[in-house]
Image: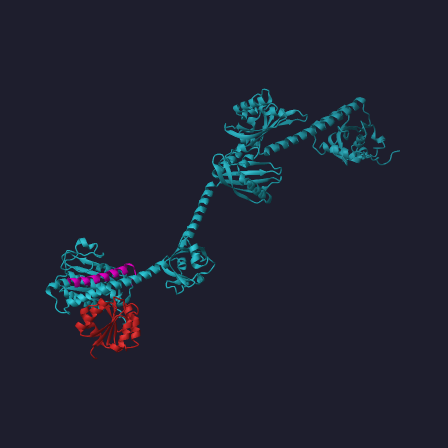
Amino acid sequence: MSELKRILHVEDDPSIQAVVKVSLEAIGGYQVQTCSSGRQALDEVEAFAPQFVLLDVMMPGMGGPETLTKLSERIDLAKVPVVFMTAKVQPSEIEHLRRLGAREVIVKPFDPMRLAGQIQAIWDAGGL
Amino acid sequence: MQSSKSVQAVTPPRELSRLAALLRYEILDTPDESDFDDFTQLAAYICETPIALISLVDDHRQWFKSRLGLDVSETPRELSFCTHTIEGQGIFEVSDAQLDRRFNSNPLVTGDPHIRFYAGAPLTSPDGYNLGTLCVIDREPRQLSEAQRGALARLSRQIMRLFEERLQAHRFADQAAMQQALLNSAASAMLVTTADGRVTGVNPTAERLFGYPEKMLVGERLTDALFPQDALFRRASILSNELEEPIEPGFAVLTAPLLDGRREMREWRLLNRNGDAVPVLLNVSTIHDENEQLHGYIVSAYDLAHQEHLQLRLQQIAAQVPGMLFQFCWRPNGQSSFPYLSEGVEDIYGLSAAEMEPTIAPIYERIHSADRVQVLTSIRHAASTLTPWQLEHRIEHPRKGLIWVEARATPMRQSDGSVLWHGLVTDVTERKAEQFELDKQQEMNRRLLEALSEAVVACDAEGNLTLFNNAARSWHGLDAHQISPERWAEYYRLFQADGVTPMRMEEVPLMRALRGEHIRNLEMTIVMNGTPRYVLANADPMYASNGQQNGAVAILRDITERKQIEVLQRDFVSTVSHELRTPLTSITASLGLICGRVMGDVPVHLQELLDIAHENSKRLSTLIDDLLDIDKLYAGKMRFELQTQPLRPLLEQALRSNQGYAESYSVSIELDACPEVSINVDAMRLDQVMSNLLSNAAKYSPTGETIRVYAEKVGLQKVRVNVCDKGPGITEAFREGIFNKFAQADSSDTRKQGGTGLGLAISKELIEHMDGEIGFDSTPGAGACFWFELPCSARVETSS
């Protein structure tokens, strides 16, 4: 398993963008590329070539699930985990998001101190 | 010249009439009577003959009513001498039969009794027929003297008189006997009196009626024996006035009217032997003798007591019947009358029976003018077809005002062509008023139904649709039709709540109610032209007053708007929750990074403030979560994903999740016993409850203490999970409301502050939604044990 370096973060709220970036870069030491919308993510994904995608669910315009579907055309979900970040959800909704192709669902509000650890754990757990 | 045989007597021309006259006296072949024997004796003595006879000659013989000196009672007619006598007039004499060629060969001459001399006087009836003779016979030839002849003729006249008298006496006796027989068998009491009123005879009925044996009454004055004096006096004075002559209060009271040629038939209350009143109808008639002279009176008394009794009975029974019972007679000549009217005539017409005679005009006038024609027409029709008559109509009652009556009568045709009706008229004003009220009520109900914005549909016990109000018709686009229940869903476009799945017959609320279910708030849709109308259905069975189910009714409320609002609300809530959470996440996360020294050291003088900010932002976040949870729970909108799963792993997971939290309070958690059972729960929600209980326990445990978690079976089908701490416990004051929103047992304890105050309220809702019960045991100062019980079953592994 190669080392995790590049994480693509798709989130429309600037505050969350900032906090996640700080959390992952300062604590996890990752390189974080932030996109404000699904559209932007699709444009930049190939150039950035992330190893990990952190995807917000509730976004205006193209929502998280749609972005995932579109992303899956450009990246191999088996190699690049896409993880949803969303407010408390029912297990069935988590199931639903997983079936769409997401590797994992991280529930908001998240602990910024532990986020990096969660991401690493998912990366280490590997595909499928 | 004498021939050998007698010359036959020539039959007289009036023979038949003569025979009839003879028979009239009813004397032939009767026994001897001494009165007649006297005459033959006398004749024989006067004429000095040994033989004297009273003979009667019928068509074939002469028969002797009386005979002296001869033993035979009859001889053939052709041998008789008397035949000759009756053919002639006056005395027939034969001095010497042997010398008379008419008789000389007669056996009675040639042989016994050897008649030589015969003299006979005819017995002539008043109408001139010679019926027979009085004759004298001798065996010696002789002649009668003039005196003897005269005597014979006189005697014969006397014998005729005797015949007549005898006949009259017999007739009289027969008549008397017949009268007596009649009297004896008469149902009426009959008393016969003399012309001045003395009783001569009474019949057995009279004896019974008045209680006197006949012999006690005979000879008594009738009016003294049976009549009450005061009544006699009253009648006497009335009669005196009427006849304008003084009438004595005695028998004259009964007879005076008769002398005037009037009938005397009157009701009296006579007295019987005991002095009791005997009501009778008395009829007095005269008896005349054969000379048209007044012989006496016959008084017949018809017992009215029975009739009075019957009338009284009828009156009493009729008084029980509400209304007027009547018998009405309609004669062919157009006249009509009421042979009988019960006392109810006052109740119905405000009249008395007396006012009804002689015409029925008073009744007719009381009928309301608008109804008269109908009354007459319907009666005439009923009379002509001999069918029962029934009609409701109005009467203007003098006392009660305008009333409604129901009249009914049955006609019977009588032999004289009149029609006799028997009927009843009852006052139905009240019933009519009630009916009117009922009709008004029903009309109002109908209007109400139509005015309702809800759709109302009803069916009868057989599933026939009986009612659709306006709303129902408009929503379904159709009226109630004879559609069988299998086709209701299809015909009336019924779908399930999703607006897409058609309802099956057994799901239709009206059908379920018909089967006895009570349906409340069932969501369904009616889809018309592709547009769904969301409705909430309530349905119930309907019962008749005898308790039998007689149908079902369904009421549908349109909730389309509400549904739309709900969708908006749901969107709103999720939007709001997202909008609330997002900034809060940022705040919490930022503060978390700062306090976690990720951005470098935090200046000491800022540390405490930043910690406070961080803690409170976390608290705010939890509060929002709790609020949204409790809102969802109370609105019934929280979805539970129940799954039967083993208990132990769930408890172990809960301990793991809350370990960190407990450590931050320097307390540890221990899982003790746990039976191997499975519970049917939403794992996430159970975890939420456990976190609530454990975090509470952690907050209130003294440092260094252990929180004990253990589970135990309660009975056969429940398991209780206990979370016990050694904290201060719950004081009496807080026990009541501890599961209420925002109740904290001890808000003065600032060191252990924390929590939203909603945790236990949410836990209670969650546990109860999962079919369980929550509670606590606590002794103040000795800690608290919060527990919840859930239904359990034998451990089943989940397939995950």
Tell me, yes or no, whether the highlighted magenta stretch contains residue B568: no
Who's red, chain-wise? A
Q: Quarter of the image for the N terminus of chain B: give it.
A: top right
Q: Is residue B725 left or right of residue B266?
A: left
- Number of residue marks: 0
Q: Can you tell which quarter of the image residue B615 is in? A: bottom left
Asked if one can make out residue B659 in the rendered structure from this viewpoint, the answer is: no
Asked if one can make out residue B662 in the rendered structure from this viewpoint, the answer is: yes
**Image coords of residue B417 (percent x, y):** 62, 40
Q: How is the image coloured?
A: by chain
Front one among B211 and B707 = B707
Front one among B216 and B138 = B216
Front one among B527 and B435 = B527
Q: Is residue B458 above or below residue B119?
A: below
Front one among B544 and B260 = B544
Q: Is residue B610 left or right of residue B103?
A: left
**Image coords of residue B559 (percent x, y):** 36, 58
Q: Is residue A19 left or right of residue B569?
A: left
Who's cyan, chain-wise? B
Region of the chain picked out in magenta, as a range: B611-638
